[in-house]
């Protein structure tokens, strides 16, 4: 029987993954295409992809920060997560989000929910619980439990206080709504953001002074 071969985009769709992840798996030898042309086009055997059982599903790492000026922290989260998985021999892919932990409508989070609901992942790895959502993480964990998906939370380094991160999330949301209401360059918008930044600094200083020396 002749093999049915598909290109990398269709192969990724069948696996509930992305072309970038399949290229990464090819580099590590975890999933090698059945055929690869001189021009670099990859072809995968559909029967091989569909015969994969649950043990072949990847570990999914999820990283998130609240604002654009925290992109360096997002990269650090990704490095920590992927290093953690590599040390344990887990085949992994990382989903990254940029947005408030109070916002449930994020592209990466939507993809994570799809993988959970389709049971296309073996485990979920986070640096801290609140990287997933500010409120409601337990519901996601319960859904993972029903699907037999393992949850791993890495407790490494100091996590920002709940008050600081919640204030940053609120600031991010106010920034968006204020820009829509007043315009991103208006004096009212700038003044409101400056006031909110002062509140966050006060929260941080209060938190520091309350900690035991």
Image (cartoon, rainbow, N blue to C red):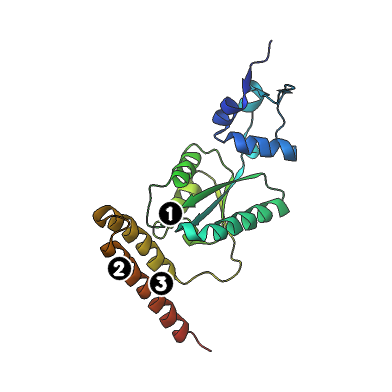
Q: Which of marks 3 and 1 is in front?
A: 1
Separation (CA) of disc 2 from disc 3 = 22 Å
Q: Name the residue under label 2.
A: 191
In percent of width and height, residue 195 lies at 32, 72
**Residue on which the image places disc 1:** 99
Q: Is mark 1 on a helix, strand or loop?
A: loop
Label 2: how many residues lie within 10 Å, few (<14), some (14-19) or many (20+)? few
Residue 30 showing in the rendered view: no
Residue 1 coordinates in the image, percent (x, y): 69, 10
Q: Is mark 2 on a helix, strand or loop?
A: helix
- Comparing marks 2 and 1, which lies closer to the viewer? 2
Quarter of image, res 156? bottom right
Name which of mark 2 and mark 3 comes first in the sequence: 3
Q: What crowding class fits label 3: few (fewer than 14 Cα within 10 Å), some (14-19), or many (20 or more)?
A: few
Q: Which residue is depicted at the point 60% across and 33% down?
A: 19
Q: Residues within 10 Å of mark 1 (few under 14, many from 20)?
A: many
Q: Label 2, label 1: how many angstroms apart (C-alpha)?
A: 22 Å
Foreground of the two, 96 or 174: 174
- As displayed, is residue 35 above or below residue 199? above
Q: Going 47% across and 82% down the picture, which residue do you hit?
A: 208
Query: Which quadrant would residue 166 be assigned to in this image?
Result: bottom left
Residue 100 drawn at (x, y percent): 41, 57
Q: Residue at x 50, y 87 (%)?
A: 212
Count of marks placed on residues: 3
The vertical placement of 87 against 43, above or below, is: below
Q: Is residue 98 left or right of residue 32?
A: left
The answer to whether residue 82 is above or below residue 208 is above
Instruction: Check disc 3 and report its element: helix, strand or loop.
Output: helix
Residue bearing the label numbered 3: 163
In the image shown, does 79 or 128 lie closer to the viewer? 79
Sequence order check: which comes first, mark 2 or mark 1? 1
């Amino acid at each position: 029987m002749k093999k049915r071969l598909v290109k990398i985009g269709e192969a990724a769709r069948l696996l509930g993954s992305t072309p970038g992840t399949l290229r990464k798996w090819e580099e590590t030898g975890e999933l090698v295409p059945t055929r690869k042309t001189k021009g670099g086009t990859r072809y995968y055997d559909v029967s091989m992809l569909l015969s994969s059982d649950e043990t072949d599903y990847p570990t999914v790492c999820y990283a998130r920060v609240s604002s654009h000026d925290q992109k360096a922290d997002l990269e650090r989260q990704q490095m920590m997560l992927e290093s953690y998985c590599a040390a344990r021999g887990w085949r992994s892919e990382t989903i990254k989000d940029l947005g408030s932990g109070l916002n449930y409508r994020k592209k990466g989070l939507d993809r994570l929910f799809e993988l959970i609901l389709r049971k296309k992942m073996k485990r979920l790895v986070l640096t801290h619980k609140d990287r997933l959502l500010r409120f409601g993480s337990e519901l996601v964990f319960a859904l993972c439990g029903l699907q037999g998906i393992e949850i791993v939370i890495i407790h490494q380094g100091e996590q920002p206080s709940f008050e600081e991160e919640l204030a940053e999330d609120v600031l991010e949301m106010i920034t968006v709504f204020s820009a829509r209401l007043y315009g991103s360059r208006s004096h009212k918008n700038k003044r409101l953001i400056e006031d909110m930044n002062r509140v966050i600094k006060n929260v941080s200083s209060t938190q520091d002074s309350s900690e035991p020396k």
